[in-house]
Image: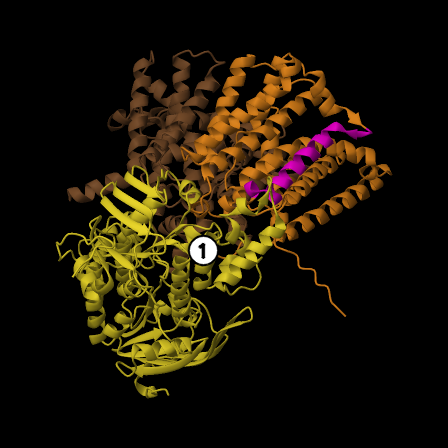
Amino acid sequence: MTTVTLRLSRDDRPILIAALFILVILVAGTLYTFARFGSAPLLSPTYLLQQLQVGAFLGIVSAGMMIVILIAQIDLSVPWTLAAAAMMATSIGGPLAIPVGLGVGLVVGIVNGIGVAYLRVPSMIFTLGVNAVMRGLMVAHTGGYAPQTTATELMRTLAADRTFGIPNALFVWAAVSVLVAVILQRTPLGRYIYAIGNKESAAYLAGIDTRRITVICFALCGLAAALTGVLLAGYSTKAYQGMGDTYLLPSIAAVVIGGTNILGGRGRYLGTLVGVVLIVLLNSVLSIMDMPEAGRQVIYGLVIILMLLVYGRNERVTS
Amino acid sequence: MQDAIPVQSAFLTLAGISKRYAGVRALEGIDFACERGKIHAVLGENGAGKSTLIKIIAGVVQPDSGTMCLAGNHVSFLTPSAANAAGVVCIFQELSLMPDLSVADNISIASPPRRFGLIDVRAQRRRAEQLLAEIGCEDVNPLMRVRDLPLSRRQVVEIAKALGKRPQLLILDEATSALTSADVEKVYAMLARLKAEGVAILYISHRMHEVDALADRASVFRNGRHIETFDKGARSTADIVQLMIGRDIAAQYPAKPPRKPVKPALTIKDLSWEKHLDRISLCVGAGEIVGLGGLDGQGQKSLLLALFGVLRGVTGRITVDDREARLGSPAAAKSVGIALVPEDRKTEGLMLPMSIGDNLTIASLNTISTGPFVDRARESAAIKRGISRLQIKIGAPDDAVSTLSGGNQQKVVLAKWLMTEPRIILLNDPTRGIDVGTKQELYRLMRELADQGAAILFYSTDYDELIGCCDRVAIMYDGRIVRELEGDQLTETNIIASSLNVHAATPVRAGAAHA
Amino acid sequence: MLDDLAIRARQNIGLVTAVLLFSILYLLYNMAHPKGFSSAVLVQNADEIFALAMLAMAQTVPVLASGLDLSVGAVMTMVGCLASYLLAGTIGGTPLHLEVFGLHIGLGTFPGGTSGILLGMAICVAVGTFAGFVNGCVVVYGRIQPIIATLATGAVYIGIALFLRPTPGGKIDDDLNWALTNSLGDFAATVHIFDDGAAAWFAPFAWIPVPFVLLVLITLLVWVPFRRSVLGRAVYAVGSAEGAAFMSGLPIARAKIAAFTLAGFFAGCGGLFLAIQTSSGNADIPQAGAYTLNSIASVVIGGTSLLGGTGSAVGSIFGAMILRVISFFFRIFDIAPLLQPLFEGLILLTAVSIGALGVLRVRNTLELFR
């Protein structure tokens, strides 16, 4: 008789726990709606698809953020990169709209990467400065008002329409997810990313061009933010001031809830996916409950702490 | 056969001490004693249990069973501070200094002199000056940040800090490994003084000549057991090594092939960098093991780093296999077939939290990829080959490399580089802190690699190693190569003399005929 | 002796640079200002600097322990909203009640008058300190990385602030507002000391802005003793090399908790002042975020390393002042308001990139990867 033992690796545990917590949220929410409305909208596929569609935006940003967090950095310029990409895409319009939007993200990402990798400015502070500059540029460009130009047809199709009943945004998110997962798991670039996040000096001495890879990672994050901006503009048909501000902290939270170590070097993309779904569902359940903003913030904070406590804490530093 | 120390005169006695870490027996029923006023050496390979023993005595870890008595009283130290309070002070291999704090702060870190509840900075400074003077190192300014001091001075500060706790039992765990020879003499003098004052001293070192010079008694540990304790001079070095390894060693160093003309694989001409390298010219041939010798800090490490593309602003010419090489980065060096086994394997050679497999393949991923993807089958084959070739003792390739012993970790570093099939292998003090058994395996491997055509440049602080392994040794002094020794000339006397630059003779060129 | 001076100067180069930079900038500002070098301008500047300076001090302590506190803005906001209830100062006291899930719960009357105000201020600062203590406990006992822990607790504190003040409101005693946001002379007059500010020996000091005095007092009475204490030094030690600090027998847990608690204290002081200055409580989330991020920028500009172990809260104060003075410049040079954010961003980016010059001089690339 052979016995099969299931060994959960350290990286798998948080994913499983987060998935369980999603179930908990669904159950709790359904109980609530049953008690209050006598219905279970949370379990209806239409509703879930709708939520996932909104979740796609957070999902794409989080994918980019995860890459940067894996190399032990952080990108605080996501809010205004997202907004700038949206604003430039709608300003330019026409067939060049999306390429220009993505181009904005690429350029910002490369600038971030150069500042962090070559100038060795701590990423927290450099991307903060870049965020402020992007905000300045957009305020100057738009005159401080919401831009009047609208999104192009293609943008709207990608973000708001459906194919075979599934929102296109989900396809985009899926494509991004496959790309990121493949890069991290199957390519040398992915290995180098984990190596740099663990110990950049050892990676450097193993002949890896750590600075170039850092630039690539920030570029990918900038692209992800820009893509989200373009999609968001398509979804709302317009770009607006501050549209990226509500995506920064949730994207970091999603990555961390998914089990990625905030200090870099460890984490699986599946975790980030689960983290995004968790946050989106939590948000929607709280909306259904008509929870005021105050309660939402408190619950948001408590959930993060609870998840992290359950995951198993950091090792005690003894030497 | 153990010479028992009469219980009354022993200062520290251990009885039946055992400790196990996750299924591995680190210590098994240890009975041990040491006396006041004697320097007692603790010898053994890595994994023999010396570190665990020391940590138990110093209060860093607790034993699973057994008792400890200090001056006749039962003791049990739950923290390092508890041990310190009882007069047991340990100087660890990993320094316990805070780099951003000053020397004075570090020396009085745990219980500084106080005034009105706050730290009395002036009294603290005076205390630091006094303790440094007791070692004879008054030139260290107590205001300096530890970060700004060279490694040997930092170790001096660590020793002063231990001294300040007025130990009754002082434990030194490889505490002199980074000291300059001048400072080592001062520490020996300090230890002699402490001995005279009746302090019991436990001394761990892998350097046999140090142990010979200092120890009054020695204990050998192997595989977690206490094998034997004997007085100074009772056992020869060969005996001791055999006790440590537990098996017969035929020869310590592999045989060297007869000298014959070699084709230079690596040619260095007029290499200079800052103040550390001054017009170095050297050839290393394919199949040769060339050693770098000399006193610490004469530029040996800088030379290796320059050859690996780590340093900026290097002038001079480096030729690899008749083609000039521009080495602007480690990646560039790797691409022309140069490999470097770095000084500090924990921060420069390995990504400790990552798996053994990932660490092994990280430098050669392009050889096991098809298209843009890593080929899993080729990867696991390469990992298996690497592990078996160097006989690395592991649990599973997915285990974190941090679970391996120091010797096995170093093997992983070497195996990683062998996967890139390098033509030139640079070794930066590769046997530091490695047990005798693994050292021998590394010597054999080096000779094997040379025989297969690699050119090896080998920096070591151990003369025996240089003489035993190398075909030729270049002695460096003040950033220059002052002498090259080979054949009959390769003796300890010549190495030492050249290290001190006593011979102002013209450097002996490779292959030149000489009387 | 000169040797020692040289060593100290080299070690504190960040602080010295920040002080010099600020001095030059402020001098230029006053020279360019039509009413420069006057008490009125000084007072106005001090009012605008104080809160950020407090938050910069708050951020410094966890950073020294190689952590980060992303909740300082939230603590400031929460304390400010609380203050808008407790510092009304009406003579008969202020009735307090809780609105929870449609239930109205009366909490009695909070005392008024001067004693009520003093009590209210003490409670506010205590709440801020307690919030910091909670942060410390989550980090130490929950063993959660500071960035994420304070991200989460910050959300909780903002939630509490929103709960207290869903819309901006509240009242602060007018005398309190006047006394603390003007010069010492006005303070003396309001509080009726030193002959209502007319005393002869007091005259040379009457022009000094009260926020400035508060800043100096808090630094001297809280920061300096902390830094010189064993616990304060343990904070530096933990930030420099935590493993070594453990081996040296230092109280690591206590040091970290102390660092976050002190951060809460400073953030609470900042929130208290902000509420008094604006005479209201406002749970403004973007403003909290802006203050938090600006506090990090102030710490960096003031010469403290984000890696921990070196730096000082005094440097961070100067960092905050530099940031504020830059925005003052916009006012007097009449930069188009549309371009102000851009300039602010560019200057911030340049300021933090100045350190990059050192990178160009590095000769051993291994030093770049610490």
Residue B324: name its quadrant. Answer: top left
- Front residue of A175 and C323: A175
Q: Colour of chain B?
A: yellow
- Front residue of B492 and C69: B492
Residue A100 locus on image (x, y percent):
59, 19
Residue C265 locus on image (x, y percent):
45, 41
Looking at the rendered image, the quarter that the C terminus of chain C falls into is top left
- Range of the magenta residues? A164-190
| Image position of B59 with respect to A278: above or below | below
- Chain shown brown: that is C
| Image position of A229 with respect to B435: above or below | above
Residue B73 locus on image (x, y percent):
37, 81
- Callout 1: residue from which chain? B
Residue B184 locus on image (x, y percent):
22, 63
Mark 1 highlights which residue? Answer: B413
| Image position of B110 with respect to C338: above or below | below
Task: Tell me which residue sits at (74%, 44%) in the image.
Answer: A25
Residue B34: name its quadrant. Answer: bottom left
